[in-house]
Image (tube, grey):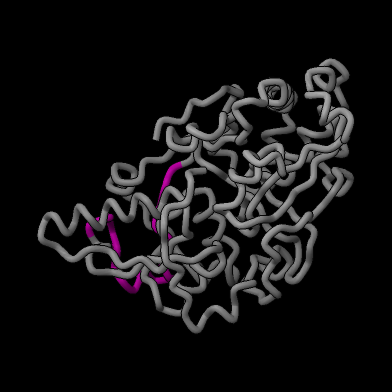
Amino acid sequence: MKVAPTRTFLMTAVTTAAGLILSLGACGLSASPPAPAAQTADKGNGTSATAASVAADTALHDLLPQRIKSAGVIRTATNIPYPPWEMYETAGGQQPTGIDYDLSQALAAKLGVRASFDHMAFDGMIPAILAGKADIVMAGLFDTPKRRASLNFVDYAKDGYSMLVAKGNPGNLKDVADLSGKTVAVQSSTSEEASLDKLSARLKSEGKPGVTLLRFPGDSEAFLAIRSGKAVARVQATSAAAYAVKTFDNGNAFELVQAPSLTAQFGGGIEGIGVAKSDAELQTALQKALQALMDDGTYRKILAKYGAESIALTKAEINQGTE
């Protein structure tokens, strides 16, 4: 994740719903108290059914750094909610679920240790790694050259971008050019925020109105801005946007807009597990454990659980992102 640029959080009347999360049980928007800035959501891997079926590999365990062998836990920094990557099972609950949660637990089980899954501010995750307060980042994070200035990435998915709009597409948005003069919701410190700033600057250089960004610290606030009409769209990784379309309000809240211009403007790319550059032993252990899960079918089983088979990779590689 890139170091966060200076930014303004434009909090409106919807801030009372800052704790909104996607509830798998309700399949809609549900209110809950906001999560604290840093919180350990789960300390073990016993709650993941997928992880429970994964056998530890002694040879892979031996590759781990001594500090993790001694502690018996990999501290995973994440930012909840960002469905389907990470979310809570129930409104107001503390038990996480999602692609990253299940995969973190399966990787830890394969390595013969546990994995915590620690919620923190999006722009606090990389600093936590660099300060030695976390071991890895798993947050649906794109592996980008800018982020690689701070971390190495064990790559585990390939995704693209789409526009999430209100059901019926009231703004009649078809491509990025239609965002001129519009208000778009975005989560601060993300690659989407930087790309939207560039798009706005380009539109202005062409003599057109730019894009007004409503910047939020969390994912849920951005969704709510669209539902309340304060923003016309959100540009988001297709995996997350498609999941929101499918699950919010039983599929009646949003729809997806896909266009070649979105790929041209925002690209797409490889998502990876962030590891400190100095943590070569952990990086190697994770890469080999991930490949083992790819080979035995566990990895695809996790993606299928969240309808995300299309983002699967077949080989666990390092720093392959290009955007």
Residue range of the region highlighted in magenta in the rendering: 160-177
- Tell me if residue 33 can be seen: yes
Q: Residue furthest left?
A: 207
- On whether residue 173 falls in the magenta region, the answer is yes
**Image: 31 above or below 117:** below
Look at 66% across and 21% down and name the residue there: 280
Image location of residue 314, percent across then percent down: 59, 24
Q: Quadrant of the C terminus?
A: top left
Image location of residue 289, percent across then percent down: 74, 24
Q: How many marks?
A: 0
Image location of residue 122, percent across then percent down: 57, 54
Q: Residue furthest front?
A: 131
- On whether residue 55 falls in the magenta region, the answer is no
Look at 68% across and 58% down and name the residue there: 87
- Tell me if residue 158 can be seen: no
Look at 64% across and 65% down and name the residue there: 22
Viewer-side residue, 177 vs 116: 116
Look at 48% across and 76% down and name the residue there: 11
Viewer-side residue, 196 vs 66: 66
Viewer-side residue, 300 vs 228: 228
Image location of residue 183, percent across then percent down: 33, 70
Q: Is residue 289 left or right of residue 17?
A: right
